[in-house]
Image (spheres, rainbow, N blue to C red):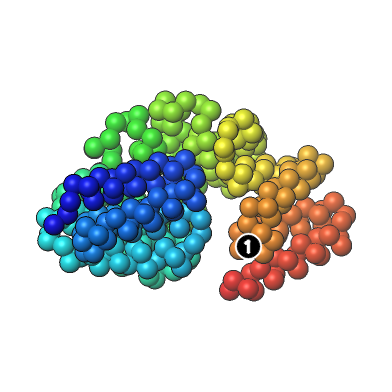
Amino acid sequence: MPTAHGQADWDSYNNAGMAAYNKGNFAEAEKSLSAALEAAEKLGPEGARVAASLTNLAAVYESQGKFAQAEPLLKRALAITEKAPVAEQVNLGGILNNLAELYISQAKYSDAEPLIKRSLAIAEKQFGPNDRQVAIGLNNLAGLYVKQAKFAEAEPLFKRALSIDEKVLSDKDPDLAADLNSMAEVDRNQGKYAESEVLFKKAIAIYEKALGPDRTEVAKCLCNLGSVCFLQGKNPEAEDFYKRSLAILEKAVGADQLDLASSLDGLAVVYDTEGKHAEADPLFKRSLAIKEKALGPNHPRLANFLQNYAAHLRATKHASEADQMEAREKAIRAANH
């Protein structure tokens, strides 16, 4: 039988570990959560506390990119939870999603898809077809399809999620804005630029009301809006949106540098299109430095950027450097074909 002392030990270690994890102190989190797992094992190797400890420790490993260490922990947590009585399987959907996210982080999309679908089915059965948890599951599945450029498959899922959230969320809820942004991105990727522009503007309006005008969520959405305006030939509007996005991200504490690079890229391409090569040049150079530092020199996300940068260098009579960028681009695409 579990003892009160043993349960108190687990609570103490688990709380300390999660507090450290939330602060980004992964070494301390790993130490405390490993101790929590050990304490949980003593209370019963198939208990809910063991599953919770495995899930929490896996999150610490995943946050550090230690996917090989996280995967067996999540698989064991899943096995334990599946064996538990149905009434005790409340965390089953969450564990399935965590394992799916781990696979997505490694581009193992075929492994992730059945897990997300199963989690979605659980949510529909547990909460009903029009619950917020179902909308989250639909967004997760649609997001997986977007990563695989399966936009036609993603679109109806995003639409259904948006339909649910419009009923259950406030019209000032940032989660509703996130839905609109996702739907707008799918429309953009399918060439539905006018529809995409409308949705991005709605998302920005909600984000600004809910969070304020200087949040990174607003900046990312402005960058998206800039891109869809550029694709419609609306260069002055695109330039304005990219500049607004950059202004927010330059000031924001802890802003993702890759988001900053995306806005730099967009503005640089607009300048190049308008023949403002001198203004574009420092933006391209800064973006390249950010991307190489964050991703390394051969990451797949660099390919499109290198293509644009090479075109810029060729337009500014730097043929040798343009050749180098094109060679890098081709090597990256060949390695990831």
Q: Mark 1: few, some, or many residues within 10 Å (few <14, many ≥20)? A: some
Residue 176, horizontal then vertical, whole percent:
35, 38
SS type, badge 1: loop
Residue identified by numbered label 1:
299
* Relative to 286, 74 lies left or right: left
Residue 152, horizontal then vertical, whole percent:
39, 60
* Relative to 203, 313 lies left or right: right
Q: Quadrant of the C terminus?
A: bottom right
Q: Quadrant of the N terminus?
A: bottom left
Q: Is residue 252 visible?
A: yes
Please give the count of numbered marks on the rendered protein: 1
Badge 1 amino acid = His
- Of residues 152 and 172, which is closer to you in this image? 172
Residue 189, horizontal then vertical, whole percent:
49, 55
* Relative to 204, 53 lies left or right: left
Q: Quadrant of residue 62?
A: bottom left
